[in-house]
Image (cartoon, grey):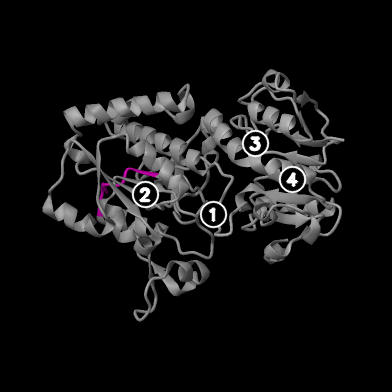
Amino acid sequence: MKNRIGIRREDKSPWEKRTPLIPSHLRELTQTHVLEAWLQPSSIRVFSDEDYKSEGAKIEEDLSSCPVVFAVKEIPLDFFEKGKVYVFFSHTAKGQPHNMPMLKRMIEKECTLIDYEKIVDDRGRRLVLFGKHAGLAGMIDTLWALGQKLLKEGKENPFSRIKQAFQYESLVEGKEEIEKIGWKIHKEGLDSSLVPFLCGFAGYGNVSQGAQEIFDLLPFEEISPEETSNFFEQRNYSAYRLYKVVFKEEHMVKPVSSEDKFDLQDYYDHPHKYRPVFEPYVPFLTVLVNCIYWEPKYPRFVTKKFLKELYKKESSPRLKVIGDISCDVEGSVECTLKSTSPDNPVFTYDPLEEKATDGFDGRGPVIMAVDNLPAELSLESSVSFSNALKPFVPAIARADFIGDFAGCQLPAAIKRAVILYRGKLTSGYSYMKKFL
C-alpha cells in the first residue's frame, strides 16, 4: 500500500501563492517511492491544479485519508484531525501568543507537529527555508520604498523606477531593472543630498545574502563598520557609487564587563551578559536593512528612545528607510510597530510621537515590514523550498508515528524539528509549557 501525503491549500492571505512541493518534484517522489500525493484545489497557488494533475497528483478537497499533511503557513483550528502529522511553519517556538490557540488544539487532537524552521543539521544550520528569497524580495521592496520616499520629498531619483517584487513577472526581470538603475547611477551619479549613500545590513546569514545579492547589482563599494565614522570625516567618497556596510553580532553588542571578550556562542547562550552598541552607526546610514535573527532574550538594536533623541537633535537625519525583513514586531528594531502586507507595505514612524502612519507622509523613517516577503517571489521561492524539502519527504511519509518518539525512524534533522509528538511537547521544546 502506498504512503499518502496531503498538501493543504494556503488561505492565510490572498498573497500566499507558495507551495511546499512543486509538481515536477511530486512526480519524481511518486515515481521513485511508494508514495502518492493529494492536494486541496487552489485558485491562487503559483502552480495550477492542472499542473499537479498532469504529474500524477490527485486534487481532492478532503485530505482526511492523508496521515501526513504538508503546508506552508499556519493552519486553521478546525482543520486538525486526531492523531495526524502536520508539517508547516507554525511560528510557535518563541511562544508567539497569536498561535498558542493553534498549538493547544494540536495538543488536544494528539497531533504531531514538524516545523520547517527547526529542521537543522548537527551544527544548527537550517536546511529547509525561504530565507534567501525573503532577502531578495525584501531588498527590492526596500529600494522601491526609498524611491517613493525621495519622490515624496520632491527629489527625482533613479530608485523611483523600481517596483515592488511581486509586480515583476519574475526575479530575473526585477534584477534586470535594478541593473539598469545601477548603470544610470554609474553614469550620472546621485543627488548631492544622498552622497555618501550608506546601506547597512544587520546580519550576514541567508536573508542578508539574498538582500545583498540585489544590492550588489548596483555600483557599490564595501566598507567595514569600523571605517564608518572616519569615512565621513575623510570625505573620500563618490556620487557614482553606493556604500555597503555589513554588521555582525560583534559590531552590534559588547560584553557588559570590560574584562570579558566577545564570544559569539557565549552571546547566543548568555545574551544578558552583553549590551547593544549598534545605535551609534545609525546616523550614518541612508538605508538600514534588518536581516538578523532575534528573540526577546536578545537586546534591541534600534530603540524608540534612540530615534526620539536623534530626531530631537536633527530635523532631517540621513536615515530614509528601514527595510525590516526580519519583521519582529517591536523587536530588534523597536519602531517596527506592526507587520505589513504587499498591498500596504510601508508606514512612516514618527519618533517624537511614537506612532505609525501608513504610507510615506510625515516625520521619520519609512518602515518596510512585509511579513510574507517570499510570497512576492512565489515561483522562485517555491522551487527552491521544494528542492530542499524533497529529500526528507519519503522518510516523513513512511515513518512510524504510532510507537514512541525514540523509535519513529525519522532522520535526525527532522527529529530535531518535531515540536509535538502525538500531542506532547518533545524534550527539546519542553520550555514551551510556560507559553501554554
Please provide percent x and percent y for residue 401. Answer: 82, 51
- Disc sitting over residue 396 in the figure: 4
Sequence-wise first label, 2 or 4: 2
Does the stretch in magenta take in 315? Answer: yes
Q: Amino acid at mark 3?
A: Pro
Which mark's residue is nearer the viewer, 3 or 2?
3
Secondary element at tag 4: helix
Evaluate if marks 4 and 3 touch, with contact meaning CB atoms under 8 Å apart. no
Is 341 magenta? The answer is no
Q: Amino acid at mark 2?
A: Phe
Q: Nearer the viewer, residue 367 or 262?
A: 262
What range is drawn magenta here? 314-322
In the image, what residue type sits under mark 4?
A: Ile
Q: Earlier in the sequence, mark 4 or mark 1?
A: 1
* Discs 2, 4 touching: Cβ within 8 Å: no
Name the residue type under label 1.
Answer: Arg
Mark toward the start of the polypeptide (4 vs 3): 3
Instruction: Indicate left or right for 225 with 13 as reference.
Output: left
Q: Secondary structure at mark 3?
A: loop
Dot placed on the residue nearer the N-terminal end, 2 or 1: 1
Indicate the quadrant containing the C terminus: top left, top right, bottom left or bottom right: bottom right
- Closer to us: 97 or 25: 25
Q: Nearer the viewer, mark 2 or mark 4?
A: 4
Q: Residue furthest bottom?
A: 259
Q: Left or right of 310: which side holds 325? A: right
Quadrant in which residue 168 is drawn: top left
Q: Position of residue 289 (x, y in %)?
A: 39, 46
Separation (CA) of disc 1 from disc 3 = 20 Å
Residue 157 against residue 412 in the figure, above or below: above
Q: Are marks 3 and 2 in contact (CB under 8 Å)?
A: no
Residue annotated with mark 2 = 201
Identify the residue under disc 3: 20
